[in-house]
Image (tube, rainbow, N blue to C red):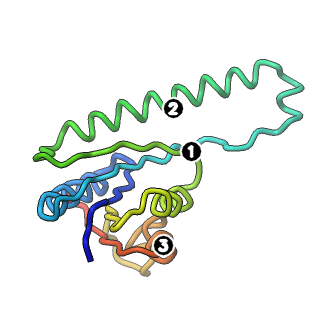
């Protein structure tokens, strides 16, 4: 199997940072690029009645969306800048909605070869050991996944 595109979903946590570092090391070894994906938690559907009741709601929601994207972009730039990329091409992606759905969609649309997930290891059941998002992604995608434990 040839790895050319590595997806790293990130919430900018220590666990995600560990996954990013691991993906950079792996990418250098196999001449792959890394795709950072941040999923922004905003409502994706708006109740029509709400828009009729308050005409400013749409503008407020658009402003909230812009602020969320600006904040995520700044965090992503800082997240990436804190690491030595060592010549690896890193692409940034942002989506709104459910993390699992966004990861599955990114794998399909971008032809991802490997997903690298960060997780915090805690004793307990498997789904809690991996973390909620990691557990759903591991069980629901059709490409190889590497789960990296947080260094912190």
Residue 141 position within the rendered picture, expressed as x and y whole percent measured from the top left: 48, 73
Q: Is residue 113 left or right of residue 40?
A: left
In this picture, is 130 found above or below 26? below
Res. 119 visible in picture: no
Name the residue that disc number 1 marks. Answer: 96
Give the quarter of the figure containing the C terminus: bottom left
Q: Where residue 47 is drawn, which disc sits there?
A: none
Q: Is residue 39 left or right of residue 29?
A: right
Residue 80 position within the rendered picture, expressed as x and y whole percent measured from the top left: 25, 40
Name the residue that disc number 3 marks. Answer: 141
Residue 131 position within the rendered picture, expressed as x and y whole percent measured from the top left: 42, 67
Q: Which mark is in front, 1 or 2?
A: 1
Disc 3 crowd rating (10 Å Cα; few below 14, some 14-19, many 20+) is some
* Element type at mark 3: loop
Q: Please report whichever mark, 1 or 2, sits nearer to the chain's N-terminal start.
A: 2
* Element type at mark 1: strand
Residue 76 position within the rendered picture, expressed as x and y whole percent measured from the top left: 34, 38
Q: Which mark is in front, 3 or 2?
A: 3
Q: Return the residue nearer the eye: 90 or 49.
A: 90
Q: Residue at x 27, y 62 (%)?
A: 4
Name the residue that disc number 2 marks. Answer: 68
Disc 1 crowd rating (10 Å Cα; few below 14, some 14-19, many 20+) is some
- Splitting the image into 4 quarters, where does residue 90 fall? top left
Q: Please report whichever mark, 3 or 2, sits nearer to the chain's N-terminal start.
A: 2
Q: Residue at x 48, y 66 (%)?
A: 132
Q: CA distance from mark 3 to mark 1?
A: 19 Å
Give the quarter of the figure containing the N terminus: bottom left
């Amino acid at each position: 199997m040839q790895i050319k595109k590595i997806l790293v979903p990130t919430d900018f946590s220590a666990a995600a940072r560990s996954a990013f570092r691991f993906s950079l090391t792996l990418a250098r070894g196999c001449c792959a690029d890394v795709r950072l994906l941040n999923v922004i938690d905003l409502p994706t559907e708006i109740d029509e009645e709400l828009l009729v009741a308050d005409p400013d709601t749409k503008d407020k929601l658009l402003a909230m969306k812009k602020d969320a994207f600006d904040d995520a972009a700044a965090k992503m730039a800082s997240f990436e800048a804190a690491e030595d990329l060592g010549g690896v091409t890193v692409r940034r992606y942002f989506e709104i909605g459910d993390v699992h759905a966004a990861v599955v969609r990114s794998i399909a649309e971008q032809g991802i070869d490997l997903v690298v997930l960060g997780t915090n290891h805690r004793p307990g059941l498997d789904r809690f050991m991996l973390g909620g998002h990691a557990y759903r992604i591991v069980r629901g995608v059709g490409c190889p996944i590497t789960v990296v434990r947080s260094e912190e």
